[in-house]
Amino acid sequence: MTAVIRSPLSVTYAVWRALFLREAVFRLSGRRVAWLWLLAEPISHVAFITLFFEIARVRVTPGADPGMFIMTGLLGFFMTRNTALRSMEAIKANSALFAYRQVKPVDTVIVRAALEGFLGLIVALIMLSGAALAGFTIVPYHPLEVLTAFTGLWTAGLGLGLILSVVGELLPDIANVAKLLFVPLYFVSGLMIPVEFVPHPYREWMFYNPILHGVEIMRGGFFPLYHVVPEADLSVLYGFSLITVFLGLALHVRYARKIIAQ
């Protein structure tokens, strides 16, 4: 019988496809109503912050409803955060699969990041559809700009996930530190108030956070009257994303054998 010889690309595709299906099943059915939590978390954040704005009578920005303003920011932030933190745990969750020589640690991280990006996009479409049914305008003023920023935020999450997945295996306590770091990032990513309201020099300090660049540009693509501050620059977000992705891939190449041996 003649052996079937498959190309490296076909093997990689088969591995990624199998991992994606496995991750999707576990993600959506691993816990009770796990699929519901995908929507409950961002909706609860939007509802709480919007209610606070209404009670405190906080002015957001001309031409943007407070709920839509908050929703766009949270969807962008959660795309980066969820992709990074869940990708960070991919190696530990799939360690038993490394007995198969076709499966590499980097495969599990990339596939889990892809799944989080796909789920984040679905959640965004569902929430925006709900906003449309409530009478809000959801069509972006510059769709390509929104998509570019959203993709950059996902790529940043992928890069962080690649790095943290390796560092977390070598230094397990780093995982807890990474989760804590996203708490202050929540407050300095411009999710609750327009960045133009932040006085100097605090605004310049906030823009050391690459997530803020993506959130700000994404809002500018949604709302035609939203004033994007001049400090916002997608090249900063994409520069950070590419650096972290290449650094993460380099770490996986360097420590792949050590990770599998553990």
Image (cartoon, rainbow, N blue to C red):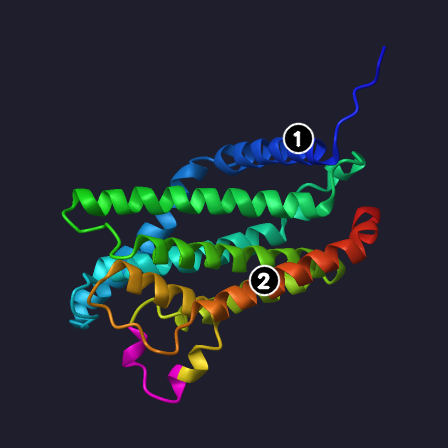
Q: Is residue 92 visible?
A: no
Q: Secondary structure at mark 2?
A: helix
Name above or below for residue 3 compared with residue 233. Answer: above
- Disc 1, disc 2: CB below 8 Å? no
Q: Residue at x 29, y 73 (%)?
A: 194
In the image, taking residue 234 as reference, residue 158 lies left or right, namely right
Query: Which range is magenta?
Result: 194-203
- In the figure, residue 226 lies in which quadrant? bottom left
Which of 141 and 259 lies nearest the eye of the viewer? 141
Name above or below for residue 120 compared with residue 10. Answer: below
Where residue 132 appears, x then y in whole percent?
A: 20, 45
In the image, taking residue 195 as reference, residue 205 lies left or right, namely right
- Type of residue at label 2? Leu
Which residue in the rendered view is the most extreme toward the top?
A: 1
Which mark is on residue 14? 1
Q: Residue at x 61, y 32 (%)?
A: 17
Q: Secondary structure at mark 1?
A: helix
Q: Is residue 182 visible?
A: yes
Number of residues whose C-alpha sits closer than 10 Å to that of mark 1, classed few (under 14), some (14–19) or many (20 or more) = few
Name above or below for residue 117 compared with residue 34. Answer: below
Where residue 140 appears, x then y in whole percent?
A: 26, 54
Q: Residue at x 59, y 59 (%)?
A: 159
- In the figure, residue 175 lies in which quadrant? bottom right
Label 2, on which residue?
Answer: 242
Q: Which tag, 1 or 2, sits closer to the chain's start?
A: 1
In the image, taking residue 208 as reference, residue 142 lies left or right, namely left
Q: Residue at x 18, y 61 (%)?
A: 65
Which of 203 and 59 lies nearest the eye of the viewer? 203
